Amino acid sequence: MYSISSENTPKLSGEILVPGDKSISHRALILGSMVNGRIEIKNLLESEDVIATANALKTLGVTIKKFKNKWEICGQGIGSFSGSNYLLNMGNSGTAARLLMGVVAGSDVEATFTGDESLSKRPMRRVILPLLKTGAMFKEPDKDTLPITLRGNKIPLPLTYQSPVSSAQIKSCILLSGLSSLGKTTVIEPSLSRDHTERMLKFLGANVETTQLQDMSWKISVQGLPELKPLNINVPSDPSSAAFPIVSAIITPNSKIKVKNICVNKLRMGLFETLVEMGANIEVSNKREINGELIADISSSSSDLKGVKVPKSRVPSMIDEFPILSIAAAKASGNTVMEGVEELRYKETDRIKAICDGLQKSGVETIDDKDTMVVKGMGSNKFIEGGVEIHSKLDHRIAMSFLSLGLTSKKPIIVNDTETINSSFPNFLGVMNELGARLKYVN
């Protein structure tokens, strides 16, 4: 178990690149395995979570090779997986587990999904229920957690599924299963969740339709059995990873940084919209498009923040960014109210509890009320006292968030169990220290 100390930092400055987007990296590997032919992927996030996806696909028989600056996949076509008794270890990745369940559900495959201690506590019934309707069979259909054994249906039934929550993982799982169906597969969700799966499917040649309904919900459909084209994919940098240095610069005096080549998909910009509402100095420049995704450079500098109310409608576009938003909120004047965030309780840990516990330990008042979280900001002129140890609960975003808070504390903040940072942001310390942060491993 690793611990990292974060010490007060005079300022942050410079230009950096952060790793490739995790969500897009998972999908590039998965859909790359379903094209007809060979593709190359550049800037793939080489984190533990993404490598778990690559290893699972290799176990299923996909040829995947890593070269110096790219990855190569020999796609086998849709629904081409076959065999039984596969053991797929998903590590810490809920995205890998849920998306690959969709792929297996649409193939003539039997596989058992396992994961680490954290992943094995996360709910899976939310994808089991719709997959059962496609004809997939589960050894224990009432089970909610890994390990789970699934037998796919080579020709899954077309499905229209009304999801109770807006979740890109649920939606993508169902759409991926539906690729090998003879008909159209449709997901209806309350608000539009991340659409990286739909964008990549369109880029590769699939027929995907996204429509807003009269009740303001969204209908996403894919036509089965598309012939996915073997087109190369360049993965943009991850806005969720970029959030940590961007917010760190905002709360650290005399700081100004630029993070380049960031995915600025409108369904991933909730954090940045909220930060601007809080008064943050943020500039988006050099917008352009690569393989269906909009990218840009994002600059941020020291700012005096004020508390705001984050509407429930914005939650799907920033579900992974609430931990680092809470750090910004701690340095704002007034209260920041985050509504409709119950989904945070089902991440790597109960993130609402972990955030509130850590902030209170750091001297910041919070309220934890079911699906609402409130951070009572101290203002930019007051320093966090520090001198505390935060337990990350093996959650990479909790760990990086409190290390960012330590940049503004009088005494160091030590975060324990930080090895899971590698699941999403390899070389986090190196990138942050390049900007001037004082992060170091401690015994």
Image (cartoon, rainbow, N blue to C red):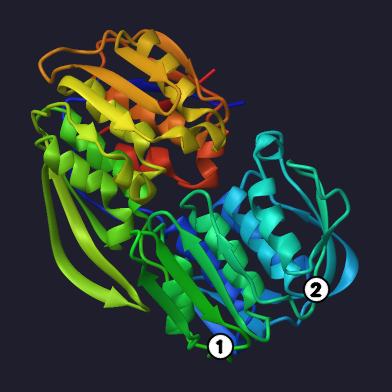
Relative to 368, 290 lies left or right: left
Q: What residue lies at 68% left-to-right and 86% top-to-bottom?
A: 182
Q: What residue is shown with label 2?
A: 153
Give coordinates of residue 307: x percent, y percent: 16, 26
Q: Position of residue 219 (x, y in %)?
A: 44, 68
Q: Earlier in the sequence, mark 2 or mark 1?
A: 2
Q: Which residue is mark 1?
A: 228
Q: Is residue 249 above or below residue 334?
A: below
- Quadrant of the drawing holding the N terminus: top right
Question: Within the image, what quadrant is residue 175 found in?
Answer: bottom right
Looking at the rendered structure, the secondary structure element under dot 2 is loop
Between 156 and 308, the residue placed more toward the observer is: 156
**In this rendering, position of residue 199 left or right of residue 59:** left
Image point (27%, 44%), residue name: 271
Quarter of the view holding residue 7:
top left
The crowd level at tag 1 (other Cα within 10 Å; few <14, some 14-19, many 20+) is many
The mark tally for this picture is 2
383 over 60 or under it: above or below: above
Q: Amino acid at mark 2?
A: Asn
Question: Label 1 near label 2: C-beta < 8 Å?
Answer: no
Residue at 41% over, 27% down: 440
